Amino acid sequence: MSDPHIQRQLALAAPLSESDPIETAEWRDSLASLLAASGPRRVREIMDALAAIARTPEIGWRPVLGTPYVNTIAASHQPPFPGDLGTEERLASLMRWNALAMVVRANKAYGELGGHIASYASAADLFEVGFNHFFRGGDRGDLIFYQPHSAPGVYARAFLEGRLQEEDLAHYRQEITARQQGVKGLSSYPHPWLMPDFWQFPTGSMGIGPISSIYQARFMRYLQHRGLLDTSARRVWGVFGDGEMDEPESMSALTLAAREKLDNLIWVVNCNLQRLDGPVRGNGRIIDELEALFAGAGWRVIKLVWGSDWDGLFARDSEGALTRAFAKTVDGQFQTFAAKDGRYNREHFFGQDPALAALAQGLTDEQIDRLKRGGHDLVKIHAAYHAAVETTGQPTVILAQTKKGYGMGEAGQGRMTTHQQKKLERDDLIAFRDRFDLPLTDEQAASLSFYRPAEDSPEMRYLHARRASLGGVTPTRRSEAPPVPVPPLARYGEFALQADGKEMSTTMAFVRMLTTLLKDQPLGPRVVPIVADEARTFGMANLFKQVGIYSFNGQAYEPEDIGSVLSYREATDGQILEEGISEAGALSSWTSAATSYSVHGQAMLPFYIYYSMFGFQRVGDLIWAAADQRSRGFLLGATAGRTTLGGEGLQHQDGTSLVQASAVPNCRAYDPCFAGEFAVILDHGMRQMMERQEDVFYYVTLMNENYAQPSLAKGVEGDLIKGLYRYATHSPEKAGDKCKVRLLGSGTILREVIAAAELLASEWGVAAEVWSATSFSELARDAREVERFNRLNPREEARASHVQLCLHGDAPVIAATDYVRAWPQLIASYVDAPFTALGTDGFGRSDTRAALRSFFEVDRHHVVLAALTALRAQGHFDASVCADAIARYGLSAQAPASWRA
Ligand SMILES: Cc1ncc(C[n+]2csc(CCOP(=O)(O)OP(=O)(O)O)c2C)c(N)n1
């Protein structure tokens, strides 16, 4: 007969309230006997066999995804704790103290700095077990995503490790002042941009960390399967908040992680049951909800709900009173229990029923108060992490129940307002000192002294030894990788430079260049083409066969088009990342490849091509995070502009990406009209990122409109990269150029501008220079810097910006683009001459390109009218000339402005 303990557990798991309790008991007993005789593996086999029958349509059984509100790993299955518990607890207490002192000090000095105590208070033990036993450091170490509001805890650890000094901690959230004083400023959240040798991954915006961690884990498999790098020893860990799980990005790639069997990925969800305003699921249980969700998505779920001191209570609970009580308790109530003392918990939790009260009888109020939740128990946490790293074939999530503001006592633990708590009074600080038994005098506690034990103390020796055994400290970030040589432009771009009037779209030109680059050695293998189900749209189907689509398990089917040269080929070593309809996923993949130089010491060159409207507008925050982590690569906004995608209408036509791109400091944004211009930008960008290793990335627009591509004039490359070069000058047959305009155009609208210049010369006797404005944002960046230099260096010789050098004089400037006017207006204040911007402000709509350009008033005729109007203001013409132009071109003053209906 089986062990009575197991018998009882099974009895509790399956209460006998059904129609035939005796029969149920017989089945249950047989299972218990099987368990005793043959062990759990055999029980699982039998259950699988029975489940297969039970799931047939006749029976229609569906397993319940949830399990009782108890730990997944039974106490009897815990591995022995391999560390020195006492030392680790003391270390954890020191981390808590220094983190708290850092935040409270900063806010005492400057109330405006902000900061958080309660999140790390809840996560400290989850972090510490990772640091002492699991998180591998060094160049080939683990990739760790830290819950952002717990950053002070990570700084506190780096302080004990000797990587940060007191002065650094004293400059938490004061990066500017710190630098002026020659110390490190500690950024509010993990920011590689601000702390480039420390943080690897920015997590401050909720949801970005979770999705990024999945795609980083997936990208490691990609590198492995393509034979580029052995990543098999590295894991990705992510510690996230339970509130954060509500973000769509957090959830959107769960099935991908399971489908691709990412057992190199472990998430720890810090379920302190609270978010900023209040409980995450006041009227439910977030752990149960997440359990069902993750299990349904195919993850291994490990619930880490209760600490070791509950083990004895469970063992004595012969009636299952605890499990029953938990099943009735919602998170809002658990939060109240966390906020209240032992006496309250005795009365209101254990007092609910006589069996529970009996369990609590041997406990003092103090002991009840100290009953730990699973996420605060180093031994239980270790058991959960241990099980996670042993898991094969699927990712693991650990749902760790904690208390928000753990240990902050009256001042914060479980309080509704605890998230933003950043000030503690003298008594609270002394109580905290007592609670965690910190070696501080009253005065040291009250004055928020940082505490680092002596280097030869057992704690410090232990801390260093643990990190040494795990490969070194973490987090650390490296900035460089061996450069990758870029082939000469002529080798892949000659056809575009010398296009000689051939018709093609810039998208076609890009695909042709990419196809050649993929064959280059050594650059080709580093290229990562990424699409979100639009490869055919952009004419990239040829690449399916040429380089294959990455698939972790190859191709298990015969593709319908197997005989075709464009056959849909999936392969384990496939090079294209085909992300399906997930721009967030594709962008996360792009970021993984774009940060590979830093994360893996192996530079990769990603090209993510997408409908431009679904880029900055759709996943702008992911792009911002990519910028923060110093990504290097190309984003290609295809079918760009409000009018090039004629028929698609309002939701597809992009008139704003370039403006958004211009606000990202390390993004180089270009809107080339011609294939040759694109080729020069590509060459420049690749050299800057792959050879010179500068932390910039490129956003370049591509168009699907076929037109005659001119050869690129010699010598314009430098100006083209600066954002403006003179393309042509059209002079009237007779008369001098007293009446002159400068026309600037970018993207497809440059062609309208060229046509307008011809009209101005031939029909209105106006000389017109045509300038190709490849990048208004680059021009503005340069002009801003020059303006600032001149302002701050009054005794130096004044400098001139590229805009000023190109556009000096007072001939009017007309700038027309396929984007909102704000894009060309970026340079307006740096131009001395009258400046008119034409653009596509308003909602897009469907029609032919010509109709749209007329509607938005960016076509050649409107450019001519704008030029004549500017000249009229200078006294070159009178009103009748403008009226003539309006009549000649059939322009309507009555047409509704495009931003109205
Ligand atoms: C995208 C985004 N939205 C909102 C915030 C503001 N915010 C910061 S923390 C937080 C609550 C976090 O709750 P949870 O994830 O449960 O973590 P906890 O701090 O409770 O451990 C909110 C709303 C943010 N940082 N990012």
Image (cartoon, rainbow, N blue to C red):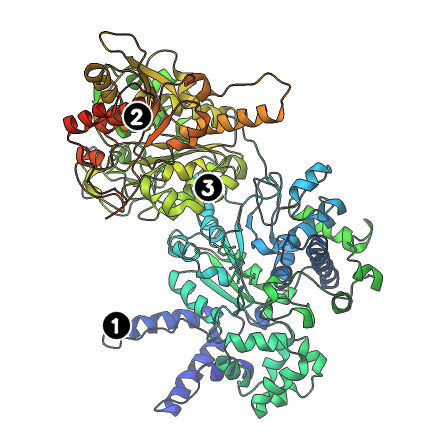
Percent position of residue 359, x then y: 63, 86
Q: Can residue 552 be seen in this view?
A: no
Q: Which of 616 and 547 is in front in this view?
A: 616
Label number found at residue 592: 3
Disc 3 vs disc 2: which is toward the camera?
2
**Element on which disc 2 rests:** loop
Task: State the image quarter where residue 872 is shown.
Answer: top left
> Callout 2: few (<14), some (14-19), or many (20+) C-alpha neighbours within 10 Å?
many
Give the mark, 1 or 2, whose residue is nearer the N terminus: 1
Label number found at residue 56: 1
Task: Check disc 1 and give the amino acid type.
Answer: Thr
Write down the residue under mark 2: 673
Percent position of residue 791, x then y: 59, 26
Give the mark, 3 or 2, whose residue is nearer the N terminus: 3
Question: 776 left or right of 884?
Answer: right
Question: 263 left or right of 517?
Answer: right
